[in-house]
Amino acid sequence: MSKRKASQSPLHEPQEKRQDLDSGLDASSLNRTHTISYPQLGANRQAAPVPFQQPTGLLTFSYTPQRVLEFTDSALRYYVDPPPGADLRYGYDRWIKRPEEITRLDSLLRAVQRVMQKADATIGEGSGVKWMRDIAVVTWRGIMTKILTAPYEERDRCELNVMYVNGTLYIEEHYSDARLKEKEDLAPKQRQQTYYGYSFESWCTSSRPGLPEKSEGHPVGWGGDVDTNVQWCSVVKTKLGDNRLVIGGEVDCVRNQFRGKTDAFVELKTSMSIRNAGDEARFEKKMLKFYIQSFLLGEIVVGFRTPQGRLTTTQSFKTVQLPRLVRGKPGAWDPQVCFSWGQHFLSSLKSILSTPPAFAEESPDDSDIQPLPRVWRIVLAPGEGVKVSALDETGLRGSEATEDRVGILPRWFFDEVGGKGVGASIPKEPPVPPAVVSAPASTHQGWNI
């Protein structure tokens, strides 16, 4: 793991050298690439504590096998112990794999809109928009995990698209067509190993609390053939430092009953059985993402497997216990480094993106139509740092303003949060989803993490 000098850390840089991040930027800076340095890592690194608030559940929603969004718990699954020695290859030839595609914020924003409408109905008209103005970030949990763990990432580069609207950062992941094709066209061995994780979820989940599935023609305990179109998702609010976050994410299952509390959530993971010190070190590195992804959300159950996909044992971890398992070991990760970095990253990003005029286009011919907010590209490069730049016409392909969208946001949501009078005048109502179709009883409520 590369080490950066103290002078390269944003927490150690002289104030005058950090002016572009911590103070106002002039208009010319909009056309250049901004950088945010990762913090220094090492045994002597002491991160200032940054609080990460216990998440509060806002609502849940499901996707059906037809990929229809519905605000129900139809895809909710319950944890059961998997049978000893379960075969993680089982059902591979019947796996329904959702095609790789850009994961937009639309379903999360429909959930946010629903929360706003409830506030309007219970507190008074305009309460929803007022609530949104206190939210610093809206994004998926997987994206927030990549941001927080970026200082420790050694391999995978990550690209994000961001818009800053009325004080809120909206963040989605960016994939080029080439990258999506690469993710779709996995080598047979890699595709098989990817399936092991989904299979483990099927062996560990049931449609009924505490009762393994018993389906004709299948082994006892098999939860149903995997269909990654089907997901159960939770939307929570939390707070990192002084930033209030609304985060959506898939949840594998719950233990016992679900009463709206996040402490019932169970995340299911697979890992190679630990055979030597190298295996142990690799597993401890994986624990960081386990921890950040599931922070304060209950527990993690890890299924250890052989290279051939045979389950050898399972182990349950309370999320808050994970840092103690690596503390004091060579190369150990520190969650406070991640939280401190996350606070600094979000503050720096807001400073860059809020510089006027942060717009994609001007409208000199019509003073009643305001210009549209810019779309920005963020690159998290392992061992190098973060680059932030406003997208030009080439980079905006797929995120242009249209009748249906304003940048990465659907037009109906953009108008809802205060964008009326910005750009073209388009109805704000979201498109009516197709009729809800119930999942077949034999289909496993799989999900794609």
Image (cartoon, rainbow, N blue to C red):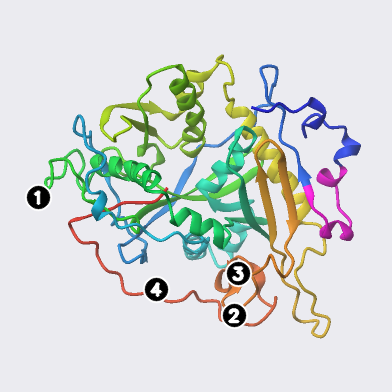
N-terminal label among 1 and 4? 1
Q: Secondary structure at mark 1?
A: loop
N-terminal label among 3 and 1? 1
Q: Position of residue 201 (x, y in %)?
A: 30, 42
N-terminal label among 3 and 2? 3
Q: Is residue 135 visible?
A: no
Q: Is residue 279 visible?
A: yes
Quadrant assignment, res 161: bottom right
Read off the magenta span.
Answer: 19-34
Identified at 69% across, 78% down, the residue is: 423
Q: Secondary structure at mark 4?
A: loop
N-terminal label among 1 and 2? 1
Amino acid type, callout 2? Glu
- Residue to which mark 1 is pinned: 217
Residue placed most toward the observer, 83 or 411: 83
Identified at 86% across, 51% down, the residue is: 24
Tell which tag, 1 or 4, sits nearer the viewer: 1
- Residue to which mark 2 is pinned: 403
Q: Is residue 64 above or below residue 259?
A: below
N-terminal label among 4 and 3? 3
- Residue to which mark 4 is pinned: 433
Q: Secondary structure at mark 2?
A: loop
Residue placed most toward the observer, 121 or 315: 315
- Residue to which mark 3 is pinned: 398
